[in-house]
Image (cartoon, helix red, strand yellow):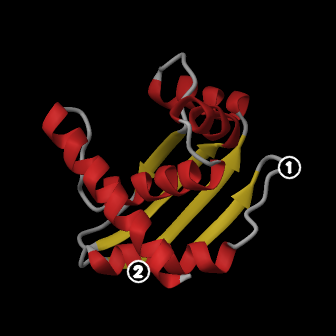
């Protein structure tokens, strides 16, 4: 089950379509959907989580807590809407496209993809593009 929660004024306009897309991404990776929570928040909210849980003192666009067991994907993803907006401007892409990238990035981590090395980051970007294209096919 995919659930969307809001700790800021932002809300998704198309929760059902995004939820269906995420479910299809999980299936495309031969994983089983468990309980996945997306929590949309602002920079300060996510900074506090970053400081308290990861001992990092900087802004980020997403922090995910992976509770997956075996092949079943479970977790909580906190997404800073402020950071997504700024990154969209920096990368010269639409807010919606950047938001999809961040949303799917977290799911891909749960599916086992990493992004610490250059090779892993390249594979992650390729997978993000592949999964974002799946959203456009469904619409």
Residue at x-position 41% and y-position 74%: 134
Of labels 1 and 2, earlier in sequence is: 1
Residue at x-position 62% and y-position 27%: 47
Disc 1 is placed on an element classified as: loop
Disc 1/disc 2 C-alpha distance (Å)? 28 Å
Q: Residue 109, percent across and down?
A: 33, 53
Disc 2 is placed on an element classified as: helix
For the C terminus, give its image quadrant.
bottom right
Looking at the image, can residue 95 be seen? yes
Q: Residue 66, percent across and down?
A: 39, 54
Answer above or below: position of 138 versus 14.
below
Residue 75 or residue 126, whichever sits in front: 126
Q: How many marks?
A: 2
Name which quarter of the figure residue 86 lies in: top right
Q: Residue 113, percent across and down?
A: 24, 52
Residue 109 or residue 49, whichever sits in front: 109
- Which residue, as the protein is rendered here, is positioned at the far top? 57
Q: Which residue is mark 1?
A: 9
Please give left or right for residue 26 compared with residue 8 in the image: left
Name which quarter of the figure residue 90 lies in: top right
Q: Residues within 10 Å of mark 2 (few under 14, many from 20)?
A: some
Looking at the image, can residue 1 be seen? no
Residue at x-position 62% and y-position 33%: 89
Answer above or below: position of 117 versus 137.
above
Q: Which residue is mark 2?
A: 24
Please give left or right for residue 78 compared with residue 112 in the image: right
- Which residue, as the protein is rendered here, is positioned at the far left? 119
Answer above or below: position of 87 versus 101.
above
């Amino acid at each position: 089950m995919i659930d969307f929660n809001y700790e800021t004024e932002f809300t998704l306009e198309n929760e059902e379509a995004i939820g269906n897309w995420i479910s299809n991404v999980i299936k495309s990776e031969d994983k089983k959907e468990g309980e996945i929570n997306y929590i949309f928040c602002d920079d300060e909210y996510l900074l506090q989580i970053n400081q308290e849980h990861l001992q990092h003192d900087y802004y980020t666009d997403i922090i995910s807590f992976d509770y997956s067991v075996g092949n079943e994907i479970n977790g909580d993803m906190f997404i800073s809407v402020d950071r997504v907006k700024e990154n969209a401007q920096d990368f010269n892409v639409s807010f919606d496209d950047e938001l999809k990238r961040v949303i799917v990035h977290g799911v891909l981590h749960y599916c086992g993809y990493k992004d610490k090395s250059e090779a892993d980051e390249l594979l992650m970007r390729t997978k993000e593009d592949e999964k974002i294209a799946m959203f456009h096919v469904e619409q």
